[in-house]
Image: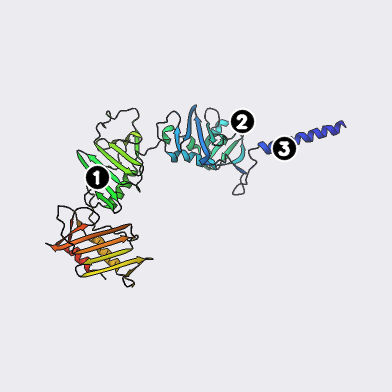
Amino acid sequence: MDNQNRLLTILAVVLLVGVALLVFDPRKDAEPSPDGDGPPQHTLFGYKADAVESFSIVRSGVAMQFDRRDGDWVLQGSESMALDPRKVEEVLNRFATLKVEERDLKGPLTEYGLDDSARTELRIRTAEGKEHLAWIGVDSSVGYRTYIQEQTNGPVHLATSKVSELVQRRAEDFRATDVWSFSTASTRRIVFQEGGTTVSLRKDDHGWWLGDTGPRADDDAVRTWLYSVETLRAESFLDGQSAASVGLEPPAATVRIEDDAGTHTLELGPAGAGRVARGEHGLVRLGADAVNPVKLDGWVSARLLPVRRIQMDQLEVQLGDRKGSWTRAEGVWKDAAGTAAIAVDGLLDKIDGAVADRTGELSRPAAPWGTVKVGEGTQRVETVHFGPSEGGWHVAWDANGGPPFRVSVLDVQAIAAAIP
């Protein structure tokens, strides 16, 4: 009987150990190696990145804690320092799906950079209150992978990719380097001020214009400028310095952009290499190769009117006794009788190639001699009227705004001759 009881006790202990291993073994969700030859793998953490509310990185006794507040990431102790959300989320996204190989590597922890003085602690907390913890070591000499421990005295595993660089970053490495943030799509006003000169651009349903009553501006030039200054980046930060000490009181130039989110202002010191600026993230120094955001001229459009062929669906031309009207549906231009008119593309070439001279002051003719109208549905219709020819020119005016301008008789004759 004693032998039987002893046997039952042993079997019970074995069963309890098996259950414990099943419950607590981090490798319970192990998967075969993708190539079939390596050791099995399991997901290190397995959280959802958008569910993380905070995480900390501790390296060489220095701790950084990142908290999500109202949808933005902040660094504890440096709340005024703007962070680049892409750099923060890169850490979370990489570790969310990281897998480790279930190798029980031997040897001292110093070989793997996992001794107390060298390892980096990564602790991630989700909104549900769950905490994920691991220690990150150095990279393997072969395969560009990283050694990881999931338990303080647990085995050393090998991650399936290199992640050491993500947790070795300094606080500065997470800092936002963009000097301002605006929406190119919703920008509706731009104002430049430099040396007593002010130049403004405004946008309405018909495109960009110089000032409130000035001529039509070149849409492509405005778009190119917006994209070039949207990517302005700080080369270094001037924390702790005053605007006066770096030559920004007063600024040498100012650029203001208005979009749907409000007004964005960039103040600039004197032009030159390492130009100082103050934007939405404080005082910074721009790189020597940074684009000059101040542009006081070169905005006036030399085009007769904007011709956006992909969006266009109506065209009407009347010049003297030559006239015609066409509509476009399913990519095909047709005349008023419904006949396909392939020659419309040639007509659009001449309209697009006509040069508008928007310099000088001109008087608007009493009545139009001719008209060119292009339309994009009912939302955007562009119309230019021409007065009679005089001295080799037609005085023209845009029905949507701006002062009168001149167009060469030769350009107008070329348009007329291209009417199908």
Left or right of 204 on screen, residue 149 = right
Q: Is residue 212 above or below residue 149?
A: below
At x 76%, y 33%, the residue is: 13
Name the residue type under label 2. Asn
User: Which quarter of the rendered picture does the N terminus lie within?
Assistant: top right
Q: Which mark is residue 311?
A: none
Q: CA distance from mark 2 to mark 3?
A: 21 Å
Name the quadrant containing residue 335. Answer: bottom left
| SS of the residue under disc 3 | helix
Mark 3 vs mark 1: which is more N-terminal? 3
Name the residue type under label 1. Ser
Q: Which mark is residue 153?
A: 2
Name the residue type under label 3. Gly
Label 1, on which residue? 200
User: Which quarter of the rendered picture does the C terminus lie within?
Assistant: bottom left
- At label 2, counting other C-alpha atoms closer than 10 Å, the crowd grade (few under 14, some 14-19, many 20 or more) is few
Mark 2 vs mark 1: which is more N-terminal? 2
- Is residue 58 shown to the viewer in this render? yes
Mark 2 and mark 1 residues within 8 Å of each other at the beta carbon: no
In front: label 2 or label 3: 3
- At label 3, counting other C-alpha atoms closer than 10 Å, the crowd grade (few under 14, some 14-19, many 20 or more) is few
Label 3, on which residue? 18
Left or right of 236 on screen, residue 366 = left
